[in-house]
Image (cartoon, rainbow, N blue to C red):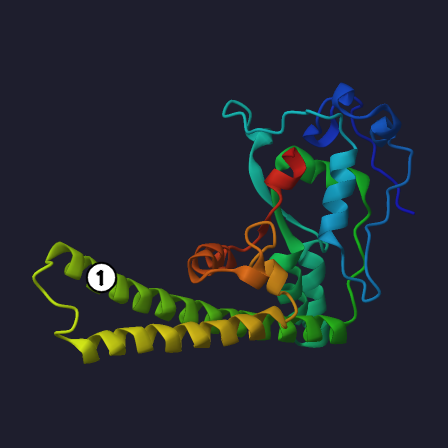
Amino acid sequence: MGERSSAPQDSPLHLPPRHEWKPKHRYIFDSTVPLLDLPVDDRGFVKPDEVIATVKDWFVPGYDWSYDPDNDETRVDDHHFHGEAADYKKLDAHYGSSVPTRFRNNPFFVGRMYRPAHNAIHRGFKIAQPPELDPMVEFLDRWDIAIQSHKRLQDAARSTLDAYERRLGRKRTLKKFPSISSDEDEYGQWLLNHEFEKNFAQYQIALTAFKAIEHSEILIPGKVIKLERASPQQVIRAGKAVAKKAIDYTDDIAA
């Protein structure tokens, strides 16, 4: 078990005030109490959701996590659930590979949160031991597959939406100019319908394939949309989160 370094007892590491912690968790201010082990799976991977749930439970209901412009220590920033960058750089050198650092920096293991919660994690938990190399390689390989599958899904969603908009545009034209008969370009209408149906069928195939991929729930979080009945518009909106370098836990902590 790790030992805490000595620190002031009022609010070390810019933690939330003592009275905002539930009484049973105020031991965290005692520098002699050992650190907690981070929850990990059988591969040694930290479980971010369990960490967040634990930290949230430390505080009294209704604690105001919101950002105070006059206090930089309330800002939102990113927490790496897997150790210090320098330690993983040493592993890069040891293995002759960038896998350890890429694993540590993977969005699945980086959480965006309020700085006081970030500090609370550092104050309350030991740093997890780095996983073995092979599980990290496998994880990153599967993540890359998920990203590629997600890109195909995004492309299919955009193609479907474009075809839908073109078909909708034709309907608007016919409504605006009633003198134009819908029979005047029967083949053109058929092409628009066929294009939409073909693209939508490809979208459904891409969605089914993506759902079967590990990490799909991370690239399109379930709290944003229900993946099994996601529309192309929802997939495109939710896909914007993929470009981010961290999973946003601010709402989870403040809820």
Tell me if 33 is positioned left or right of 215 in this view: right
Residue drawn at x 49%, y 55% as measured from the top left:
238
Residue 35 lies, with reference to residue 21, above or below; the image says below
The quadrant holding residue 226 is bottom right
> 164 or 62: which is nearer to us?
164
Percent of width and height locating residue 156: 42, 72
Tell me if 188 is positioned left or right of 249 in this view: left
> 187 or 110: which is nearer to us?
187
Residue 100 lies, with reference to residue 38, above or below; the image says below
Residue drawn at x 56%, y 34% as measured from the top left:
75
The quadrant holding residue 85 is bottom right
Residue drawn at x 68%, y 57% as measured from the top left:
86
The quadrant holding residue 193 is bottom left
> Which quadrant holds the C terminus?
top right
> 101 or 61: which is nearer to us?
61
Tell me if 254 is positioned left or right of 25 in this view: left
Please say whether residue 50 is visible from this viewpoint: yes
Percent of width and height locating residue 227: 57, 60
Residue 158 lies, with reference to residue 115, above or below; the image says below
Percent of width and height locating residue 241: 50, 55
Q: Which residue is mark 1?
A: 171
| Crowdedness near tag 1: few (<14), some (14–19) or many (≥20) residues, C-alpha within 10 Å | some
Query: Farthest residue toward the left?
Result: 179
Q: Which amino acid type is marked by label 1? A: Lys
Q: Considering the numbered disc 1 on the image, is that residue within a helix, a strand or a loop?
A: helix
Tell me if 208 is positioned left or right of 53 in this view: left
Percent of width and height locating residue 220: 56, 58
